Amino acid sequence: MSGVTIHQVAEAAGVSASTVSNVLNGRTDRMQAATLARVEQVIEQLSYRPNRAARMLRTGRIKVIGLIVPSVANPFWGALARELEAIALAEGYHVLLCNSERDPARELKYGEELLADGVSGVVLCSSLPSLDHVAPLLSRGLKMVAFDRTAQAGDPASLSSISVDNAMGAELATSHLIELGHRRLAFVSGSVNSVNRRERLRGFRSALESAGLDPADAIVWPGADTSEFGDKNAAELGRNASRELLSRPRPPTGFVAINDMCAIGICRGAKDVGLRAGRDVAVVGFDDILLADLFEPPLTTVRQPLPEMAAETFQQLRARIESAPAAGRSLLIRPRLVIRESTAPAPSTVPAQATAPALAAAGAEDTEAD
């Protein structure tokens, strides 16, 4: 039945409209079980759905939260969306998903649209160096929590942030390779302009120093290149990096990748030049996406505990929606190293330099694929 109003539901159930409203909003602690069951039965029979526009006029907001991610082309962000949506639905909220491609103008535009639509709050997944561009949204009353980000000096003071400890995660990955006997290491990330990439590079270098190795002897790829690589290009970045690095006179035996998609690309690039991850070279990823365990060889990686992080993110956002605390809160969550088959003890000699025929064959394969 279309066009059913809350008053018609109340009349059919023999209760007041406020009682129906309490049922719809979960305020049933003091309601008799028989009354609750009767109202729920009538709602189901009449196929009643609350009018969101009307609810917004009454309350100024709707039980919808926005989720702004860099790109669901990276399975990590898709997995986060799934976890957060499940938690939100259980609490009576719905989730709107937006892809920003790490563009501050898009982050701001989506925030403005969500604010105009009356959403309750927004989870912003941004590792940009500064979030001062969202300060006007916060001053206009938008409730926001930043995910996958440690608090930075230029961030609005009222903004809460949640992140895995990126530096610790990279230290775990690098120390694992060192313990396996690898001494010539490469950190593959694309640009390191973002907050979490800088933290992971810091952890990589810290582990080298703790082991008595000179960070200057390690490779940071692509070095001084400041171009940005989106998540959808991470696998291609890793593949290009390993093919180039393994062709050098002193190639690395161990790779620390900025994320799992990059690590998968590194493994494929090694295969292109006749080497195998887990035998000739060791590769560690970051995130522990579903594909990491299904890839061949299964990927050693740093796990971000998404269920815990998503739950904490939602609870912090809901607290801001309901009570609007003035000060932000920064929370770091411990990562865990998951050891699989893409890492193994360092070979007795460094991998042979990739030959020109091998690289030429790899290039020919790409040309045919295109």
Image (cartoon, rainbow, N blue to C red):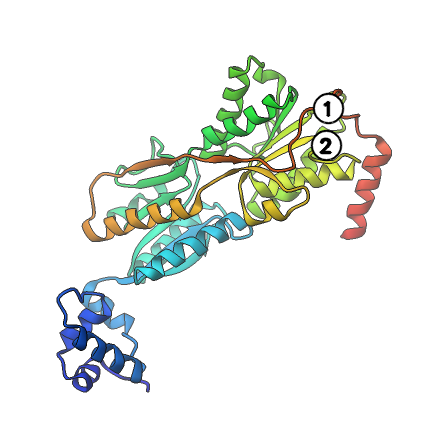
26 displayed left or right of 345: left
Check disc 1 and give the amino acid type: Pro
Q: In the picture, which quadrant includes the N terminus?
A: bottom left
Given residues 206 and 181, the one toward you in this image is 181
- Where residue 164 sits, quadrant-wise, is top left
Kind of residue sitting beneath label 2: Arg
Q: Position of residue 332 (x, y in %)?
A: 37, 35
Q: Residue shown at 40%/38% (left/top)?
A: 163
Q: Residue furthest right?
A: 357
Q: Which mark is residue 91?
A: none
Residue at the image point whose x is 69% and y is 34% from the top:
278
Q: Is residue 351 above or below residue 290?
A: above
Please state which of residues 316 and 325 is positioned toward the viewer in this rendering.
316
- Disc 2 designates what residue? 279
Gap between marks 1 and 2 measured at Cα: 8 Å
Return the residue at label 1.
347
Q: Position of residue 52 (x, y in %)?
A: 28, 70
Which residue is at a point 80% across and 46% down the rendered structure image?
365
Mark 1 Cα-neighbour bin, 10 Å: few <14, some 14–19, many ≥20: some
Q: Residue furthest top?
A: 212
In this orientation, which residue lies closer to the viewer: 40 or 47?
40
Vertical side of 30 occupied by 306: above or below: above
How many residues crowd around disc 2 within 10 Å: few (fewer than 14), some, or many (20 or more)? some
